Each structure stands twice: as structure tokens, then as C-alpha cells.
């Protein structure tokens, strides 16, 4: 195939032509081209120099006749030298004045992004855009099941805009499709529908967690850097799914999951086992096992590793509340990736922002009088399923989390990763840092050279207790 020769009315031709970019940069095709400044410049260069059409700002897809939208999105190398998603996939700005009055199928997002040609390239900060190498070309059609979840996401966002609440939007409101912040720090707020309160600029985007699953699927299935999920015959649904497509045609994801828990409210583990014909075995993760079986309809090994939870960045956490209303332990998250913290200069692009702005499914068990009997006659304190709810961190707490991240980043960049430098639980600042290695000898790579102790992100126990009480 010669450069510039493809049928822009045919998506198969467009996809085949895009394969020429794999393992190449734009410089390989046009030596004398000038750089573009500003964000989005690489996409514009691809449109003009490789596909040979003028950039426009129309609401329709880039290849309108073929129904294909072109997206260029960066990858990075993580500390294991593996390719990873660098950022969300932005799919167009949100118009607070207009988007509240459109159905999902009428939206710019749906019309433009139903089928996307996603060009993954390796980000290298000091390299001119013309010299950035493309690694994968992916023709991605949003699956029907994902669209059902995205429709509900869209309705949550548009309902807020309709009701003059655009200033309260959060990425944690939704599963796959989100309203992400756009613009620079200190930008003025813009007018919104139905309110005199200004709102930050936001864009429709596919979350990093969703894009991570697209990348992982591409890594597994690509052929010479090219992959498409468009198939001529319907594929069988994977085993590790929490809900089925037919279920989502009748109810929302949240509704399906919560309804599964209702029959077990105020029941203990023994009663759960009798109701589900299971043997009451002992496990250190007894209550996670119970919650997992309910959430996954007894069909999923670990709901946190299911398709929907991974795509949404959703995490199920089980919490045990003592009779006095307090919880014993703080809530841990993943270990701090020091290299990621060191490299990331923007709070909204950080791994911690992704973690804390995500959605959570909290399953709460409360201690009661009495005991339960497990396998071998082992006795345990009796806890009953007391509450279950989806939760997103409020903006005020995210503002505290930003200060928390800035403290961590300052410690990492200054090479002062010692307990006394991080926030401590005794500081009573909602979050803290403390070790989470197997032992003192369990070390990880230091960006400044050598090895350092592993530390972890934590919610303070008091903070978890308060959010449970606030929900009740």
C-alpha cells in the first residue's frame, strides 16, 4: 500500500492503512514537516501528514462516512519496563449549556466514539512529536455491554448538569465514561445550565482503568501491532463477569449488585452458608469471601478482577465494625510506586488521584453478641451483614488527598522516604503512610538509586468509621 492511498469511506481500508504506522514515527513518512505546538498536536499531525485531511472541529467522527473516530493516546514504561496507560482517553469537551438536553444516542460522544481507531504511541518527554514511535493500532468498537454501562454513566453526568450541579461532578460518579477535569490550574470557572455557580471545565473521557483493559487485550491478541475487537460472529461472554448483558438491559449495574445483597442483610456467615448450600469453612478472608460470593452471584473468583470492576477501576472493600461502632484497622491500598510519584507532576494524572477518585463498593459487617461455629468446631465472633453501598470520595476530601500526595511527592523527590517525613495516623489528616512490606528487608527500587522500604497509601480508621456513619 502506498502512502496516502486508502478509502476514507471504508473502515477496513482505514484500519489496514493505519498499520503502516506501527513501529514507525511520522518522521519516517514526511521529513520536512513542521511541529505542532499545544496539546493534541500529535493527533493533528497524524490527520494532516499521514491520513492527508484537514483538521476540523465538527461534531461528527473524523472519518464520518466510515463512522470511525481517530484517537492518538500515549503509553509509558513503568518501573517493570512494561507498557502502561499514561492518561485517560479524552473524547470531547462537555458543553454545560447543551449536553444536559441530549439523550445518550444523540450525544457527541456516542456519535463520534462508537468506533475508534486508537493509535498507541510511546511517550518520551524530550522527543519531538514527529519522532514519537507508534506501537499499536487498534480498531475498537464499544461493546454493547459497555455501552449499556456508559449510557447509565452518561445519564448520571447529564442529570447533574441538568440540575445545575455541574460544579459537583466527579470522575468517581461513574463506571467507564467520566467527566474529567480539563484546563490549567487557576483557570476561571465557566457558566453552567440552571445555576449561577461556575463549574470547572470538563471533558467526556474513558477512564484510565477502562483504557488499561483495552491495552491489555491488545497486548494479548495483536498481530504485528494491529488489533480489532470487531468480529463477524458474536463472541461468547467471558466467565469472569459480574453481570450479563441481558441483566443490564433491565437494570443498572449498581441496582443489580445491591439487589444481590438484600436477601443477606442482617445475616451472619453461618446463615449465609445455609442459604447458599455452602460449607462453613475457616479463612482469614472469611468476610471478603462471603461478600465476593454475593456480589459475583457465586460465579466469580474475585470480583475485583472481573471485567466490569477492572474497566471501571471499581474496588470492593469489606469492613468489620466492632460493637462500640469503631473499626479496628485502617484501610490499606497499594504500595507507593516511587518512580511514578517522581515522574508525575500533575495531581490529576497521578496514580493516587485515580485510586482515590474511583468508586468503591463497601460491604459492612457489624459485630454482635454470640459466636459462629466454623469447620472443625472453631468459634469466631458473630458479625452480620449490616450495610452495603457504592461510595465516591467527596471533593473536599479529594482536596485533602491532593495535599497528602504533594507531601508524598516532596518526600520522594527529596529522597526522604522515612516515616517521620510522611503523614502519620496520629496527625489525624484522613490519610497516612506506613510500611506494608513483608518485613524490614522487603525493599523496592529508589528512583535516586539503591533500595528503600515499601510504603503504602492508607485511609485512617477514623475516616472509614465516619464515612460509614455518614452513609447510615
Image (cartoon, rainbow, N blue to C red):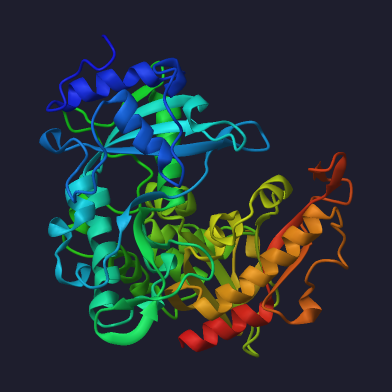
Identify the image quadrant of residue 236: top left
Residue 115, position as x, y percentages in the image: 22, 39
Residue 301, position as x, y percentages in the image: 46, 48
Front-most of 73 and 436? 73
Identify the image quadrant of residue 347: bottom right
Residue shown at the point (84%, 55%) measured from the top left: 414
Residue shown at the point (81%, 44%) measured from the top left: 446
* Residue 255 as seen in the image, left or right of residue 22: left
Could you tell me which quadrant the N terminus lies in? top left
Residue 83, position as x, y percentages in the image: 55, 33
* Residue 23 as seen in the image, left or right of residue 438: left
Residue 371: tell me if it is visible. no
Q: Residue furthest bottom?
A: 324
Front-most of 417 and 376? 417
Does 367 appear above or below 252?
A: below
Identify the image quadrant of residue 34: top left
Does 166 appear above or below 209?
A: below
Does 54 appear above or below 101?
A: above
Q: How many labels, in total?
A: 0
* Residue 4 as seen in the image, left or right of residue 441: left
Residue 175: tell me if it is visible. yes
Front-most of 384 and 84? 84
Residue shown at the point (43%, 20%) measured from the top left: 32
Residue 81, position as x, y percentages in the image: 64, 31
Amino acid at each position: 500500500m502506498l502512502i496516502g492511498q486508502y478509502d476514507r469511506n471504508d473502515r477496513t481500508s482505514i484500519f489496514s492503512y493505519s498499520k503502516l504506522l506501527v513501529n514507525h514515527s511520522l518522521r519516517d513518512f514526511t521529513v520536512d514537516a513542521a511541529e505542532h505546538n499545544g496539546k493534541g498536536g500529535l493527533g493533528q499531525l497524524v490527520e494532516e501528514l499521514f491520513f492527508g485531511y484537514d483538521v476540523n472541529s465538527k461534531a461528527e467522527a473524523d472519518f464520518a462516512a466510515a463512522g470511525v473516530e481517530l484517537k492518538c493516546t500515549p503509553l509509558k514504561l513503568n518501573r517493570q519496563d512494561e507498557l502502561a496507560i499514561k492518561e485517560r482517553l479524552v473524547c470531547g469537551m462537555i458543553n454545560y449549556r447543551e449536553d444536559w438536553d441530549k439523550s445518550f444516542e444523540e450525544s457527541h460522544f456516542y456519535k463520534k466514539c462508537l468506533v475508534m481507531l486508537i493509535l498507541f504511541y510511546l511517550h518520551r518527554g524530550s522527543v519531538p512529536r514527529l519522532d514519537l514511535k507508534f506501537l499499536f493500532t487498534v480498531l475498537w468498537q464499544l461493546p454493547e455491554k459497555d455501552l449499556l454501562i456508559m449510557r447509565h454513566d452518561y445519564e448520571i453526568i447529564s442529570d447533574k448538569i441538568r440540575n445545575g450541579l455541574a460544579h459537583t461532578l466527579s470522575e468517581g460518579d461513574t463506571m467507564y465514561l467520566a467527566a474529567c477535569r480539563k484546563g490549567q490550574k487557576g483557570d476561571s470557572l465557566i457558566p453552567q445550565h440552571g445555576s449561577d455557580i461556575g463549574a470547572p471545565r470538563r471533558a467526556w473521557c474513558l477512564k484510565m482503568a477502562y483504557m488499561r483493559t483495552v491495552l491489555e487485550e491488545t497486548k494479548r491478541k495483536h498481530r504485528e501491532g494491529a488489533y480489532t475487537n470487531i468480529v463477524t460472529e458474536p463472541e461468547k461472554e467471558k466467565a469472569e463477569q459480574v453481570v450479563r448483558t441481558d441483566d443490564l438491559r433491565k437494570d443498572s449495574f449498581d441496582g443489580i449488585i445491591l439487589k444481590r445483597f438484600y436477601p443477606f442483610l442482617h445475616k451472619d456467615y453461618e446463615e449465609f452458608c445455609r442459604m447458599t448450600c455452602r460449607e462453613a469453612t475457616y479463612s482469614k478472608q472469611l468476610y471478603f469471601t462471603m461478600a465476593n460470593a454475593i456480589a459475583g452471584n457465586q460465579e466469580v473468583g474475585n470480583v475485583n478482577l472481573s471485567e466490569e470492576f477492572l474497566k471501571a477501576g471499581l474496588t470492593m472493600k469489606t469492613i468489620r465494625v466492632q460493637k462500640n461502632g469503631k473499626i479496628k484497622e485502617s484501610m490499606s491500598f497499594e504500595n507507593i510506586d516511587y518512580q511514578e510519584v517522581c515522574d508525575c507532576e500533575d495531581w490529576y494524572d497521578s496514580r493516587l488521584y485515580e485510586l482515590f477518585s474511583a468508586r468503591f463498593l463497601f460491604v459492612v459487617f457489624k459485630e454482635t453478641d454470640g459466636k459462629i461455629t466454623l469447620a472443625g468446631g472453631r468459634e469466631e465472633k458473630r458479625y452480620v451483614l449490616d450495610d452495603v453501598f457504592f461510595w465516591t470520595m467527596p471533593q473536599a476530601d479529594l482536596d485533602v488527598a491532593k495535599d497528602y500526595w504533594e507531601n508524598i511527592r516532596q518526600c520522594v523527590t527529596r529522597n526522604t522516604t522515612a516515616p517521620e517525613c510522611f503523614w502519620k495516623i496520629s496527625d489525624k489528616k484522613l490519610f497516612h503512610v506506613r510500611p506494608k512490606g513483608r518485613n524490614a528487608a522487603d525493599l523496592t527500587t529508589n528512583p535516586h538509586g539503591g533500595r528503600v522500604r515499601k510504603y503504602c497509601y492508607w485511609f485512617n480508621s477514623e475516616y472509614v468509621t465516619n464515612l460509614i456513619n455518614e452513609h447510615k
